[in-house]
Image (spheres, coloured by chain):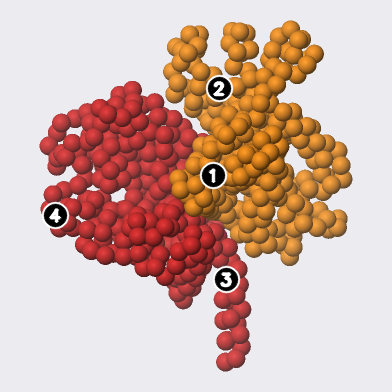
Chain colours: A red, B orange
């Protein structure tokens, strides 16, 4: 019954978000029907675009999982953007430095990304466990430290040949793109990242529902004091949870900077970090919900360019819709009240 | 060294002022018990409103357009913050999530509107606010050079608001009630204070102040709206914590961040600073805030009820 309720709340939030979007389309003097038609066509029209939708969804799945995983332990990871950036930086550094064969280089890059992101998140985790520093504030600070770290490290060590603001391009041996997959999807951006993401979804679902570690982490999320009384090491759980969340965000970094793109840019905090919060909320913090929500947001992001080309609607509509969906998810308590009232009424009638 | 400080102080002050007013807005909100990490978004709203109003009016009234723009930003900021207030106060939503939604909505919506209006996502204003030397005071040795030359009128406006906020929060019954809502809302409620109303007012003040901060960025050093506040709102949040939720502390923290950032920006051209790597200077405010959080963790002055929804039935 609970899954049903979450699903209904998510759908209501999406519908409200889409309604807000159509209102804005009217402001832009375009027909919402055409707008959404082109938006969805742009993401699903042919095999190439479906590939792009999945490629856009890949980092979102991972950042969404990152936020959701920490949330299960009662922690709010706003730092996915910074962890993702550091993961991307570590992967890019390996990919540009070593000329190993692909089957060795790519796994090393993936490992480095997970390690970098994990360490970046371990700091706020440790600060929370040891000094009770609120993780929301510390992860925001870590985001900006990551931003400036990349800002100075990339031009100093990995400067691109044309632009000051980006790193050199990764060679094809250091890319998650593989020929057969690119061919299968007609030259789309899709890459091995999607398989990584799906394997991780399964893994996280397993950890959360079938292992002692997952049980302990969730218990800490439900009630910190009761867990402590039951003999769970709360501080250890907090650090582990943040570190795993950071590793997931770091993986998002490698799939984005070495899969979807082929270099890392400076001066940008990746929007996927914040979109991950939306994904996690909409997916009700469950791994499979995250997968669905990320693919939906990937679709919006992929379709917006096509919609912009066919109508006069600015592409920012996709971000506005996503932001509105978060707002309605945050206020879903209103709908939850209505839902409970409705159920009571139906129950009373019986 | 003093020469360098005198040289950069007008720039550092120009950078400090928007941070100060935004952090002051955050102070009202958090003192009433509502965490507002939407400051960044509210600044963006102010930037957009300011830039939009000014471009519409500046050809007609070149001088006053800037002040009308600032006023418009204050009003729109206060109205926009109602979204946060409604979610957090009336619906008891998670304040952090709502704040994130505010940030995202503000960035996307204003860029969307700017694109509709100008075709590109940017809005440029033609005339910035002029810098003036304050007569007499600017002739004082050292101090005059530091504080009273090449200053913007908005600097003095914000300092007056700082003084006013301190007075209202700490010297009036209204301020006491507002702070009570952030420390112990149930006690405030049983003393007859309308907690919801107080919190609504506080959040609207935070919206008005942050938007004013954003608009000041536009009319002083930036001159262009481009859909982002580049982390200033988050820096203001850091200053609020680093200043331990006190007006004077916030002034100190923002001035510190303002000088640190300006030093980082000019370090390339000042030989004395060129040896310090830029990365250290730029990450300095954030690292210092993390350290401050650790140092203050035992004696934190954070409003006790900040972040918790007020539920009348729960005692």
Q: Residue at point 72% right, 46% down?
A: B205
Q: Are marks 3 and 1 on the same chain?
A: yes
Residue bearing mark 2: B262
Numbered badge on residue A183: 4
From the viewer's perspective, is the residue at label 3 or at label 4 nearer?
4
Of labels 4 and 1, earlier in sequence is 1
Residue that label 3 marks: A335
Mark 4 crowdedness (10 Å alpha carbons): few <14, some 14-19, many ≥20? few
The reply to whether residue A322 is in sight is: no
**Disc ID at residue A44:** none
Quarter assignment of residue A113: top left
Residue at point 33% right, 47% down? A252
Q: Mark 3 vs mark 2: tell me if same chain.
A: no
Q: Tell me: A300 left or right of B105.
A: left
Mark 3 or 1: the one toward you:
3
Mark 3 to mark 4 CA distance (whole Å): 45 Å
Decide if residue B5 is in sight here.
yes
Q: Are tags 2 and 4 found on a single chain?
A: no
Q: Are marks 2 and 1 on the same chain?
A: no
3D distance between C-alphas at marks 4 and 1: 43 Å
């Amino acid at each position: 019954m609970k899954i049903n309720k979450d699903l209904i709340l998510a759908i209501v939030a999406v519908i409200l978000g889409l309604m807000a979007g159509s209102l804005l389309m009217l402001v832009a003097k375009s027909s919402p029907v055409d707008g959404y038609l082109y938006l969805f066509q742009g993401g699903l029209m042919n095999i190439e675009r479906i590939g792009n939708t999945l490629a856009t969804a890949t980092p979102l799945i991972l950042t969404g999982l990152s936020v959701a995983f920490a949330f299960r332990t009662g922690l709010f990871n706003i730092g996915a953007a910074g962890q993702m950036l550091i993961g991307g930086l570590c992967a890019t550094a390996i990919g540009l430095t070593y000329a190993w064969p692909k089957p060795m280089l790519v796994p090393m890059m993936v490992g480095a990304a997970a390690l970098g992101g994990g360490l970046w998140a371990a700091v706020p985790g440790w600060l929370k466990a040891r000094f009770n520093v609120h993780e929301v504030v510390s992860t925001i600070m870590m985001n900006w430290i990551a931003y400036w770290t990349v800002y100075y490290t990339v031009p100093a060590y990995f400067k691109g040949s044309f632009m000051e603001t980006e790193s050199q391009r990764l060679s094809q041996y250091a890319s998650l793109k593989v020929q057969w997959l690119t061919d299968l999807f007609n030259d789309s951006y899709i890459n091995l990242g999607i398989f990584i993401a799906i394997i991780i979804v399964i893994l996280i679902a397993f950890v959360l529902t079938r292992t002692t570690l997952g049980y302990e982490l969730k218990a800490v999320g439900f009630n910190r004091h009761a867990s402590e009384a039951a003999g769970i090491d709360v501080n250890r759980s907090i650090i582990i949870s943040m570190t795993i969340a950071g590793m997931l965000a770091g993986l998002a970094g490698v799939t984005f900077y070495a899969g979807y793109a082929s270099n890392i840019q400076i001066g940008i905090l990746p929007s996927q970090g914040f979109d991950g919060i939306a994904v996690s909320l909409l997916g009700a913090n469950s791994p499979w919900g995250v997968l669905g929500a990320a693919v939906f947001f990937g679709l919006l992001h992929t379709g917006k360019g096509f919609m912009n080309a066919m109508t006069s609607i600015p592409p920012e509509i996709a971000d506005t819709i996503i932001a509105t969906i978060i707002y309605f998810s945050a206020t879903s308590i209103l709908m939850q009240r209505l839902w409970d009232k409705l159920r009571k009424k139906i129950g009373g009638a019986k | 060294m003093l020469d360098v400080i005198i040289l950069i102080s007008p720039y550092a002050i120009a950078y400090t002022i928007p941070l100060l007013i935004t952090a002051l807005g955050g102070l009202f909100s958090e003192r009433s018990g509502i965490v507002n990490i939407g400051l960044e978004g509210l600044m963006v709203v102010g930037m957009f409103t300011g830039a939009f109003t000014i471009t519409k009016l500046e050809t007609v009234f070149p001088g006053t357009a800037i002040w009308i723009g600032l006023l418009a930003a204050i009003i729109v900021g206060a109205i926009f913050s109602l979204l946060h207030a409604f979610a957090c106060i009336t619906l008891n939503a998670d304040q952090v999530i709502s704040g994130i939604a505010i940030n995202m909505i503000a960035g996307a919506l204003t860029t969307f509107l700017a694109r509709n209006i100008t075709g590109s996502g940017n809005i440029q204003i033609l005339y910035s606010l002029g810098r003036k030397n304050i007569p007499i005071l600017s002739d004082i040795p050292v101090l005059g050079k530091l504080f009273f030359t090449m200053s913007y009128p908005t600097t003095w406006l914000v300092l007056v608001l700082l003084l006013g906020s301190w007075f209202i929060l700490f010297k009036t019954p209204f301020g006491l009630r507002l702070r009570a809502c952030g420390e112990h809302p149930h006690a405030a409620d049983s003393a007859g204070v309308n907690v919801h109303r107080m919190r609504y007012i506080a959040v609207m003040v935070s919206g008005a102040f942050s938007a004013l901060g954003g608009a000041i960025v536009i009319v002083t050093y930036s001159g262009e709206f481009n859909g982002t506040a580049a982390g200033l709102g988050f820096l203001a949040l850091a200053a609020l914590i680093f200043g331990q939720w006190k007006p004077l502390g916030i002034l100190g923290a923002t001035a510190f961040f303002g000088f640190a950032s300006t030093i980082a920006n000019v370090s390339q051209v000042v030989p004395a600073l060129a040896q310090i790597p830029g990365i250290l200077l730029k990450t300095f405010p954030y690292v210092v805030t993390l350290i401050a959080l650790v140092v203050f963790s035992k004696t934190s002055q954070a409003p006790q009820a900040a972040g918790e929804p007020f539920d009348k039935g729960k005692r």
